[in-house]
């Protein structure tokens, strides 16, 4: 289905999506440029969780909006892998081994697995392998390599030369109790003998670019040339604005703790302008994400996290994008793995139908909003990074129904999809891949996360009569088998089948609810299950008769 893309600076006077608003705001603040740089980044000190992903995809959505407007954009993602290894996260393997490297730079901590050269790279690879699956492929910058290559030697020299000015700026945003006391330096050093950061700066010879330090951990002392040093880096509050200037960053969001009044973003903005001569990037704050049932935000250092790879086992890539695309960044929300999963799939399907004009929106504004959310939720882009129109209308099957089919098929996806094809609306061959991907997510959710009351397994053929049923209930099951299931193909729809079920209940002198319970006990050994009429019409007739043969 062809979709015209009208996302231009001229005609998008009333943006349909917050990413378009942010893109236009950035253009107003930075002016027309040949190239815009959008940035994100994190320290890979532990599992990069789905809360961290919120910043990554927020930048990606603004990048997409800019590219859809015809702008050229550089999307950089900085791995702050020259930071200190302060704590072993609880979810990491080899706890005792990792603990030996506390206070080292994280690039010098050994990897928990053989497929990465160090601890930082281990955490980076987990992200770099997952991001392309949701259509995100930034340019990665590795800060340890850039510092050791001398790329930031000039930025460090400026900070050392203007350390008094830096101190005044930092103190301006602190109360009296937290102002910097005594001698202060804007750089830190990893000891070149023991590799720890437990060092102090002794002297700085600006004329010769020489920095002297001593280590309190091992007693080592040394003097290094800043232009060639492999172990010196800026303190984080200075490093961040220095890199804005170095990379010419035009846009970078930050978490609400950084965007609090007088917080690190305010400090960095002044440092960037007054020390490095670069206006701070356009920005917005994003809120925390929590896991449903957990208190507070996720923490990589504590290890109580879920990462993007795990989310993609439950939600297809488009759904994973949709969760974030459809929520403004400044709204806190939870990532859910309970029955809310069904609702999220239903919401996405409704958005898709509205966007493709398969379902009417309540008004034009709603249509434009849903269409834009849907566009930005798609994974595929062209060579310039613009959102591609859909070549084929996706095949929709309600997630709840798909889950029921999979359970009826004993979690065999091919059997479940074969049953779906028999329902009278088979998918086209080109639609099978995306349908199977959704089915894989449904199966994983059933096996790992779905509540017990949602899950079921059909009894085997020739199963014993349920001991939970009395004589009247057994008779009712027998009547249901003979009068409804034996004629199941004669019912035109679920409503007609449901009428027949209630008629059996009436004939047996029991309420419909009691018959339902008896039927579920006979078929799946539970008091409740999927809607009975639809359930019976979905299951193979011969299989039902075999299960109930003993009645």
Image (cartoon, rainbow, N blue to C red):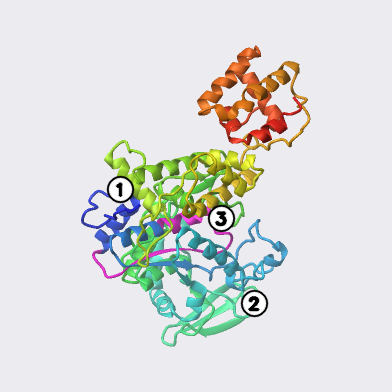
Residue 335 lies in the magenta stretch? no
Q: Which residues are magenta?
A: 31-59
Q: Residues within 10 Å of mark 1 (few under 14, many from 20)?
A: some
Asked whether the viewer can see residue 149, the reply is yes
Nearest to N terminus: mark 3 or mark 2:
2
User: Percent x, y for residue 116?
Assistant: 62, 71
Q: Which residue is mark 3?
A: 307
Mark sitting on residue 318: none
- Residue found 40% across the figure and 53% down from its top: 392
User: Percent x, y for residue 484?
Assistant: 61, 24
* C-alpha span from label 1 to label 3: 29 Å
In the picture, the quarter occupied by the C terminus is top right
Q: Which residue is mark 1?
A: 16
Q: Residues within 10 Å of mark 2 (few under 14, many from 20)?
A: some
Instruction: Answer left or right for 237 relative to 9.
Output: right
* Local SS, label 3: loop
**Cβ atoms under marks 1 and 3 closer than 8 Å:** no
Nearest to N terminus: mark 1 or mark 3:
1
Q: Which residue is mark 2?
A: 194
Instruction: Answer left or right for 449 relative to 289.
Output: right
Instruction: Answer left or right for 205 relative to 515.
Output: left
Most foreground residue, 425 or 175: 425
Asked whether the viewer can see residue 51, the reply is no
Residue 34 lies in the magenta stretch? yes
* C-alpha span from label 3 to label 2: 33 Å
């Amino acid at each position: 289905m062809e979709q015209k893309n009208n996302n231009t600076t001229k005609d998008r006077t009333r943006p349909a999506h917050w990413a378009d608003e942010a893109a236009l705001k950035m253009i107003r603040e930075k002016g027309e440029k040949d190239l815009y740089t959008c940035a994100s980044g994190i320290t890979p000190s532990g599992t990069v969780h789905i809360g961290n992903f919120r910043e990554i995809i927020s930048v990606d959505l603004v990048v997409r909006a800019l590219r859809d407007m015809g702008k050229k954009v550089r999307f950089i993602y900085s791995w702050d892998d020259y930071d200190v290894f302060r704590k072993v996260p609880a979810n990491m393997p080899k706890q005792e081994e990792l603990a030996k490297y506390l206070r080292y730079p994280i690039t010098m901590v050994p990897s928990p697995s053989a497929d990465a050269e160090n601890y930082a790279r281990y955490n980076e690879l987990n992200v770099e392998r997952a991001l392309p699956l949701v259509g995100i492929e930034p340019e990665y910058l590795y800060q340890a390599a850039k510092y050791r290559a001398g790329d930031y030697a000039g930025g460090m020299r400026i900070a050392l030369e203007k350390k008094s000015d830096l101190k005044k700026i930092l103190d301006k945003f602190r109360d009296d109790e937290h102002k910097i006391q005594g001698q202060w330096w804007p750089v830190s050093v990893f000891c070149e003998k023991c590799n720890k950061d437990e060092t102090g700066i002794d002297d700085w010879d600006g004329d010769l670019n020489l920095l002297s330090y001593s280590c309190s951990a091992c007693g080592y002392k040394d003097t290094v040339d800043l232009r060639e040093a492999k172990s010196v880096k800026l303190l984080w509050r200075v490093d961040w604005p220095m890199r804005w200037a170095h990379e010419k960053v035009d846009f970078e969001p930050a978490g609400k703790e950084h965007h609090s009044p007088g917080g690190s973003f305010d400090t960095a903005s002044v440092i960037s302008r007054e020390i490095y001569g670069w206006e701070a990037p356009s920005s917005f704050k994003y809120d925390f994400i929590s896991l449903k049932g957990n208190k507070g935000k996720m923490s990589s250092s504590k290890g109580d996290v879920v990462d993007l790879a795990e989310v993609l086992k439950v939600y297809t890539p488009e759904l994973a994008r949709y969760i974030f695309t459809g929520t403004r960044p400044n709204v806190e929300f939870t990532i859910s793995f309970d029955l809310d999963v069904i609702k999220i799939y239903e919401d996405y399907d409704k958005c898709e139908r509205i966007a493709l004009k398969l379902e009417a929106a309540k008004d034009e504004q709603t249509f434009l909003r849903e269409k834009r959310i849907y566009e930005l939720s798609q994974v595929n882009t062209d060579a310039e990074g613009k959102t591609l129109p859909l070549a084929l209308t996706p095949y929709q099957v309600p997630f709840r129904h798909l889950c029921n089919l999979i359970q009826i098929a004993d979690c065999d996806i091919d059997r479940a999809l074969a049953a779906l094809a028999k329902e009278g609306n088979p998918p086209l061959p080109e639609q099978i891949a995306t349908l199977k991907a959704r089915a894989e997510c449904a199966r994983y959710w059933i096996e790992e996360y779905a509540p017990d009351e949602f899950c079921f397994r059909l009894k085997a053929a020739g199963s014993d009569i349920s001991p939970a049923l009395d004589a009247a209930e057994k008779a009712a099951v027998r009547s249901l088998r003979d009068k409804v299931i034996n004629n199941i193909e004669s019912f035109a729809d679920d409503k007609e089948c449901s009428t027949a079920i209630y008629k059996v209940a009436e004939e047996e002198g029991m309420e419909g609810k009691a018959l339902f319970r008896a039927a579920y006990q006979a078929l799946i050994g539970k008091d409740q299950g999927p809607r009975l009429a639809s359930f019976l019409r979905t299951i193979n007739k011969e299989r039902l008769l075999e299960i109930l043969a003993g009645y």
